[in-house]
Image (cartoon, helix red, strand yellow):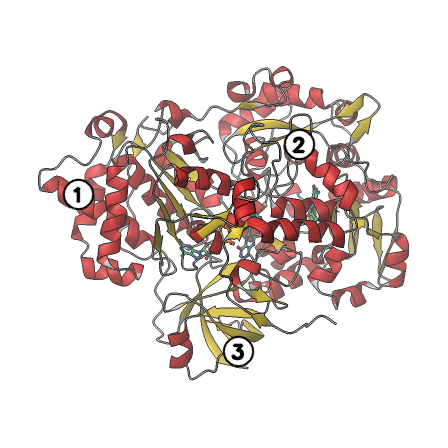
């Protein structure tokens, strides 16, 4: 029998390699889809095939024969699984009983197969026809006193066509309440970068990695969360390009990696060292690192050297002097204390950056999920501007997005703060007056549920209650609603924590074929680097009762908006008609969409800063100030630790694939805390002892998670890490970045208490 207790054995092999190959085989076997899954994998990210449902990193445009990674294979295997959640399953389990099961168990039950409606008399989900389901949604939406009493969530797997129609339907219904997963993720990119460079997206494309002379990977766990990017890092490293990894956790793949697609390396057990400089930053210490690097540059300029790109600065930017003056007031002792790294290393990072004629800075949740995440990204932009690292080959800012279409969903209208220009376009194209006031982001939507103003929640994908902060409060909020709707592929907690009425509506997944009366349809996806590509499923749908997301949106619209003159019915059949409307609403970027997308490689959406054009109010790239060194409000409590909630190697957000986290050496348990040994000893604790964590907050709410096992781990002093979503009960709802609304999930102030 397998040993089911926590095992911790530091992983000293390179990441990738045979371990990844074995894990790929294992997950296909576990989901009983070895042949089907392997065949589908051959179509993933290939022209004419479908886009990987996992992360948003672009594929190389068919340079390789295989375009998938271990974690893409896991996502596919779990989607193509042979297991099914049927009406018999729901007849066997009450919702109360299902609540006792783990997230892992729920995920392992397989694909949803038919629409289900909650029956309070039996506390079970019972089968329900699609017609009845849409009628119920129509009834609830019509009964509201105001359209603002409904919350329309979107997770980032939803393709452009469905997201676009959803945004139109909701606006015709009358609200901009669009909480979405981006609100918890890269919203600081979407809100923080526009005042700086004029767009809330990344500015690099894949080829830039071939021209970069330095690459910084900050707060992003590449080998786990965007493994295909490892190919680019390996190639860069082989060219001798310095790679600086900035992370409180020495993530394995950033140290050493074997390309599973490199036959020679695989055969010889070779590997490529990745980071030439590993910066073991304190949580939130990135601001001090960036300012320290800028200080080195300004100091050397002051001594008469030419370090900055003066021509670029003069022609394209505004505000540099104020940033310089602020940075020059900082002293080295503070920079070192806040970053947790030595002055010499900050100087080395600066040196790498100064020597490089083209630098890319990539980042993930380690930068965005802080109280001042948006402003922190503006400092990243400052650093890049100093050397003109925009609009030239090999340079730019590169947010590594999460969900495969999270960026696309925003582009086509999933936005609680739409611009007036966009709303005018919607009015002109569709002939109705959309609501002008801003709607709710994710945190605000939970607040509206709590105070009773929100009554209906519709979830287009995702697992809202598990993803949001303050789990216990979020559950209570959800349970106050009149109707909750989960539009999903897999059963999850969000379907069990529900309103008085509740529906589960099962959808055709990314890897599956969409057939309509007009023939086979495909959808489109926008990746992290603004490439729009077609995605065409190859597998038969998991059940004959599934519907594509596009059809579900149209039928919700027809039920909720009987007077609508928009031809919803026609969109169900012919997705080119939807693309024509997208082109009309966004002529600048989507002109000729239906034709251009006939190229299986897709096309790139214009990113103005790549042309050194800055769509800001003053037409310049702006240096913006964030005085001081605190990315999070300091807490005056010597016992305080900063908690980062992170993903393991075996999960996709709230979907748990297994209890292992191979690269961090943890097996069979997710209730662990990664802690610096000295921090543990200072608290008089034994290694592997069980403790509880409590949030330090001033709002009088007790937030606590018990039964966490301490692991001695190379964390900086004062920093601990544990897993999302298990630790979400510790994250206060109002602990978020005020610019973007993004919860500060990487810097929760906590204290350790005896279990
Ligand atoms: N397999 C897989 N792929 C995924 C996902 C998944 O769950 N599984 N999720 C998708 C989604 S939606 C997203 S948003 C992305 C997330 O991908 P990532 O951005 O990699 O997300 P995380 O695992 O949350 O953590 C990022 C890293 O930030 C580091 N970190 C924590 N605090 C700090 C800090 O203060 N400073 C710095 N510099 N680093 C810090 C952590 O140690 C960790 O290595 O991945 C996407 N891809
Ligand atoms: N503490 C803490 N909290 C966090 C984070 C963190 O780092 N720490 N990260 C945040 C981030 S970055 C994100 S993006 C959010 C994620 O939040 P969500 O996007 O809401 O969560 P997921 O776990 O990705 O959603 C999984 C569910 O999506 C459904 N699904 C899968 N594929 C499809 C599909 O093709 N169509 C439809 N309709 N449904 C599908 C399945 O039913 C599955 O159960 O969580 C956030 N919450
Ligand atoms: Mo995300």
- Give the number of the mark in front: 3 or 1: 3
- Residue 534: give x, y in percent of width and height: 65, 27
Measured along the vertical axis of the image, is residue 533 above or below residue 663? above
Q: Quadrant of residue 410?
A: top right
Q: Mark on residue 688? A: 3
Question: Which image quarter holds the N terminus?
Answer: bottom right
Ligand 2 neighbours mark 2 (CB distance < 8 Å)? no
Question: Which image quarter holds the C terminus?
Answer: bottom right
For marks 2 and 3, the one nearer the N-term is 2
Q: Mark on residue 298? A: 1
Secondary structure of residue under mark 1? helix
Horizontally, residue 311 falls left or right of residue 591, namely: left
For marks 2 and 1, the one nearer the N-term is 2
Horizontally, residue 222 falls left or right of residue 53, namely: left
Q: In this orientation, which residue lies closer to the viewer: 103 or 34?
A: 34
Measured along the vertical axis of the image, is residue 388 above or below residue 368? above
Q: CA distance from mark 2 to mark 3?
A: 55 Å
Residue at x 56%, y 27% (from the top left corner): 61
Q: CA distance from mark 2 to mark 1?
A: 52 Å
Residue at x 56%, y 66% (from the top left corner): 666
Quick check: marks 3 and 1 in contact, CB under 8 Å? Answer: no
For marks 3 and 1, the one nearer the N-term is 1
Provide the residue designation for mark 2. Answer: 172
- Residue 392: give x, y in percent of width and height: 34, 26
* Residue farthest toward the left in the current orientation of the protein: 303
């Amino acid at each position: 029998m397998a040993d089911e207790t926590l095992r911790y054995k530091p992983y000293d092999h390179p990441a990738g390699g045979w371990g990844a190959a074995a894990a790929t085989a294992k997950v296909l076997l576990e989901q009983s889809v070895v042949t089907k899954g392997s065949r589908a994998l051959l179509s993933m990210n290939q022209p004419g095939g479908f886009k990987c449902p996992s992360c948003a990193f672009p594929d190389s445009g068919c340079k390789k024969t295989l375009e998938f990674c271990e974690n893409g294979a896991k996502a596919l295997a779990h989607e193509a699984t042979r297991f099914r959640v049927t009406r018999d399953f729901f007849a066997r389990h009450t919702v109360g009983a299902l609540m006792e099961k783990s997230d892992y168990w729920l995920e392992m039950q397989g694909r949803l197969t038919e629409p289900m409606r909650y029956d309070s008399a039996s506390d079970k989900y019972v089968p329900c026809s699609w017609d009845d389901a849409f009628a119920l949604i129509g009834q609830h939406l019509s009964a509201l006193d105001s359209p603002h009493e409904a919350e329309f969530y979107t997770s980032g797997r939803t393709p452009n066509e469905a997201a676009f129609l959803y945004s139109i339907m909701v606006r015709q219904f009358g609200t901009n309440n669009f909480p979405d997963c981006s609100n918890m993720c890269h919203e600081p990119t979407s809100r923080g970068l526009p005042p700086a460079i004029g767009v809330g997206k990344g500015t690099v494309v894949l080829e830039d990695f071939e021209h970069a002379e330095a690459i910084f990977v900050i707060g992003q766990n590449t080998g786990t969360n965007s493994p295909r990017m490892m190919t680019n890092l390996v190639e860069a490293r082989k060219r001798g390009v310095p790679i600086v990894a900035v992370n409180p956790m020495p993530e394995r793949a950033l140290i050493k990696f074997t390309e599973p697609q490199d036959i020679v390396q695989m055969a010889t057990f070779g590997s490529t060292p990745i980071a030439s400089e590993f910066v073991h930053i304190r949580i939130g210490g990135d601001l001090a690192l960036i300012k320290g690097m800028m200080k080195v540059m300004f100091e050397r300029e002051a001594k008469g050297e030419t370090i900055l790109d003066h021509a670029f600065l003069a022609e394209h930017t505004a505000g540099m002097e104020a940033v310089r003056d602020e940075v020059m007031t900082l002293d080295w002792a503070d920079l070192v204390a806040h970053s947790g790294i030595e002055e010499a290393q900050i100087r080395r990072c600066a040196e790498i950056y100064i020597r490089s004629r083209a630098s890319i800075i990539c980042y993930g949740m380690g930068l965005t999920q802080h109280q001042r995440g948006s402003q922190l990204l503006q400092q990243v932009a400052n650093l890049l501007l100093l050397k003109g690292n925009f609009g030239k080959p090999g340079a730019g800012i590169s947010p590594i997005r999460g969900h495969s279409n999270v960026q696309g969903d925003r582009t086509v209208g999933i936005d609680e703060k739409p611009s007036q220009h966009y709303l005018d376009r919607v009015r002109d194209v569709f002939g109705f007056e959309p609501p002008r006031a801003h709607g709710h982001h994710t945190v605000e939507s939970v607040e509206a549920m709590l105070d009773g103003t929100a009554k209906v929640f519709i979830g287009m994908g995702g697992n809202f209650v598990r993803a949001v902060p303050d789990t216990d409060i979020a559950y209570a909020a959800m349970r106050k609603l009149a109707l909750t709707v989960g539009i999903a592929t897999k059963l999850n907690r969000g379907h069990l924590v529900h309103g008085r009425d509740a529906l589960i509506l099962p959808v055709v997944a990314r890897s599956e074929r969409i057939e309509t009366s007009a023939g086979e349809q495909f959808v489109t996806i926008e990746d992290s680097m603004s490439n729009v590509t077609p995605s065409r499923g190859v597998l038969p749908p998991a059940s004959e009762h599934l519907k594509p997301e596009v059809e579900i949106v149209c039928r919700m619209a027809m039920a909720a908006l009987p007077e609508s003159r928009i031809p919803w019915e026609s969109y169900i059949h012919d997705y080119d008609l939807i693309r024509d409307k997208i082109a009309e609403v966004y002529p600048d970027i989507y002109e000729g969409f239906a034709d251009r997308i006939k190229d299986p490689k897709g096309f790139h959406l214009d990113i103005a800063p790549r042309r050194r054009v800055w769509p800001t109010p003053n037409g310049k790239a702006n240096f913006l100030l964030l005085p001081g060194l605190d990315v999070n409000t300091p807490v005056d409590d010597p016992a305080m630790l900063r908690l980062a909630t992170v993903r393991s190697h075996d999960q996709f957000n709230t979907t748990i694939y297994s209890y292992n986290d191979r690269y961090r050496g943890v097996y069979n348990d997710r209730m662990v805390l990664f802690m610096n040994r000295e921090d543990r000893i200072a608290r008089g604790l034994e290694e592997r002892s069980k403790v509880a964590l409590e949030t330090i907050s001033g709002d009088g709410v007790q937030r606590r998670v018990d039964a966490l096992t301490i692991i001695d781990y190379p964390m900086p002093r004062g920093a601990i890490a544990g897993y999302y979503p298990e630790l979400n009960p510790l994250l206060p709802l109002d602990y978020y970045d005020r610019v973007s609304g993004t919860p500060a999930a990487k810097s929760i102030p906590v204290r350790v208490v005896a279990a």
